[in-house]
Image (cartoon, rainbow, N blue to C red):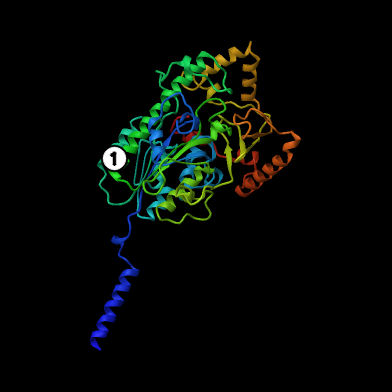
């Protein structure tokens, strides 16, 4: 009898121990490293297009992970884009619609979510777009001001010296390929052919050659951080690479065209993501937080704007979103041109909220030699005798109330199909989709734009 009782007690103890393992026996959560480039066009990255500079580290990462050909940001402007990443919420929902604005302090961000899972959370380099990044609860934050180009060296050094036993969530941001671009070009300007939307002048080719050097710098920085992460953290690292929006070129940054909102995205996770895999699943920057959170063993809140695409990474599905919504407001009184849009797998619908206004940006109103005026002025001069150049400048400054593009047949977005009867049903559907999304956001168009507080008084970083 006593022996049977002792056996029963021992069995019960075993069951209790099995059903409630001590914390030290739980599987270690994966380290998460997110590397962000600045102002980098997806087509200038070798895994996605044919840029003018070699990007061997992007190719190396793509060979080790999954490349996404249709990834987008929520906004083609630094602060709104990065605010959406940090919160998993669309810009109006988190409070950062204008450039240099920041998410409201009552909104949860990466540190809040990952601290709940026991992570150390750090940000080095241009993670956000405001000096107050430290107020969001990072355990370590440094080098977050404009063009602190020693940020990558600092990130590598910090990783090499780190001794914490906690799993790590680290976001590193390089300032490249933001202006000012290096003075020494990466390639011979004469070898460059500008894309159709740009006016082909010697000044334009020189600018693109200098931008190519900035792209090469971003690729170099990616390689340094990727190697440091693997060296210090081992194999179980979820490594994410992307860019906050397109390059600071006409029709790129500050625009809802593909050159502004479509970005490179490569994700590596040894043993989990098939090396060299490619996906055409549509994803957005608002989806990166819930994806990393789920990969770390957390449960993404249902009220986030973003949704996890972890099952795409793990090869369980090949689809994520069927559309992404896009927004741009301005940078105080600079780059001020409010736009909303929706992009499906085939179509892009753009609504210009103030079509009577003129589009301007740092390109045509910026400083000589640093933003875009050096080549823009050559465009203005060329337009005096070249009707094609004059038309490009007209399209840059003047936009219709609505734009509709068939990206399957017109990937360069050159032919506006609004008013074409054959596309009337598609136009009506996308109008309704955008209307519903704006209503759900509490976005009242120009009324909302006029109510946004100007963050320029608190500006602490570059354009």
- Decide: is 116 above or below 443: below
Q: Please tell me how many numbered marks the rendered image carries.
A: 1
Could you say where residue 39 lies in the image, as x and y percent from the top left?
A: 47, 31
Q: Is residue 403 left or right of residue 82?
A: right
The quarter of the displayed image where residue 353 is located: top right
- Depth order, front residue of 147/419: 419
Could you say where residue 448 lies in the image, as x and y percent from the top left?
A: 62, 41
Q: Is residue 104 at all visible to an observer of this figure?
A: no
Extreme residue toward the top, this view: 385
- Decide: is 135 above or below 371: below
The quarter of the displayed image where residue 336 is located: top right
- Depth order, front residue of 32/312: 312
Extreme residue toward the right, this view: 421
What kind of element bears circle 1? helix
Extreme residue toward the bottom, this view: 1
- Decide: is 105 above or below 44: below
Determine the residue positioned at 25% across, 89% down. 1
Determine the residue positioned at 42% across, 45% down. 274
Q: Is residue 448 at all visible to an observer of this figure?
A: yes
Extreme residue toward the left, this view: 3
Packing grade of label 1 (10 A; few <14, some 14-19, many >=20) is some
Could you say where residue 15 lies in the image, as x and y percent from the top left?
A: 32, 73
Could you say where residue 95 lies in the image, as x and y percent from the top left?
A: 53, 44
Q: What residue is pinned by disc 1?
A: 158
Determine the residue positioned at 32% across, 55% down. 28
Q: In this view, does 158 lie to the left or right of 376?
A: left
- Decide: is 354 above or below 5: above
């Amino acid at each position: 009898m006593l022996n049977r009782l002792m056996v029963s007690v021992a069995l019960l103890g075993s069951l209790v121990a099995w059903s409630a393992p001590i914390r030290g026996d739980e599987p270690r959560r994966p380290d998460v490293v997110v590397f962000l480039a600045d102002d980098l066009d997806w087509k200038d990255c070798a895994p996605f297009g044919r840029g003018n500079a070699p990007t061997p580290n992007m190719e190396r990462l793509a060979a080790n992970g999954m490349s996404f050909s249709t990834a987008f940001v929520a906004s083609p402007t630094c602060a709104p884009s990065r605010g959406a990443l940090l919160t998993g919420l669309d810009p109006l929902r988190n409070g950062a619609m204008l450039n240099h604005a920041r998410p409201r302090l009552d909104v949860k961000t990466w540190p809040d979510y990952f601290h709940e899972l026991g992570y150390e959370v750090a940000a080095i380099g241009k993670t956000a777009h405001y000096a107050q990044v430290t107020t969001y609860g990072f355990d370590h934050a440094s080098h977050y001001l404009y063009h602190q180009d020693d940020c990558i060296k600092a990130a590598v050094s910090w990783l090499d010296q780190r001794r914490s036993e906690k799993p790590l969530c680290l976001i590193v941001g390089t300032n490249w390929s933001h202006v000012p671009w290096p003075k020494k070009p990466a390639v011979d300007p004469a070898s460059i052919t500008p894309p159709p939307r740009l006016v082909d002048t010697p000044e334009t080719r020189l600018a693109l050659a200098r931008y190519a050097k900035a792209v090469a710098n971003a690729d170099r920085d990616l390689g340094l951080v990727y190697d440091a992460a693997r060296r210090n953290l081992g194999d179980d690292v979820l490594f994410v690479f992307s860019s906050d929006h397109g390059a600071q070129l006409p029709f790129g940054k500050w625009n809802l065209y593909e050159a502004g909102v479509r970005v490179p995205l490569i994700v590596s996770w040894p043993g989990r993501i098939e090396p060299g895999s490619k996906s055409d699943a549509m994803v957005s920057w608002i989806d990166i937080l819930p994806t990393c959170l789920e990969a770390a063993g957390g449960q993404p809140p249902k009220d986030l704007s973003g949704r996890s695409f972890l099952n795409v990474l793990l090869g369980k599905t090949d689809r994520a979103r069927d559309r992404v919504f896009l927004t741009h407001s301005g940078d105080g009184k600079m780059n001020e041109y409010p736009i909303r849009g929706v992009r499906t797998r085939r179509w892009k619908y753009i609504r210009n909220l103030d079509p009577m206004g003129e589009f301007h940006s740092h390109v045509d109103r910026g400083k000589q030699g640093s933003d875009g005026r050096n080549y823009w002025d050559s465009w203005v001069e060329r337009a005096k005798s070249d009707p094609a150049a004059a038309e490009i400048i007209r399209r840059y400054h003047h936009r219709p109330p609505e734009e509709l593009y068939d990206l399957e047949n017109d990937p360069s977005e050159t032919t506006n199909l609004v008013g074409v009867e054959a596309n009337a049903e598609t136009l009506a559907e996308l109008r309704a989709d955008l209307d519903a999304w704006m209503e759900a956001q509490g976005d009242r168009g120009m009324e909302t734009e006029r109510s946004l507080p100007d963050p320029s008084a608190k500006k602490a970083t570059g354009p």
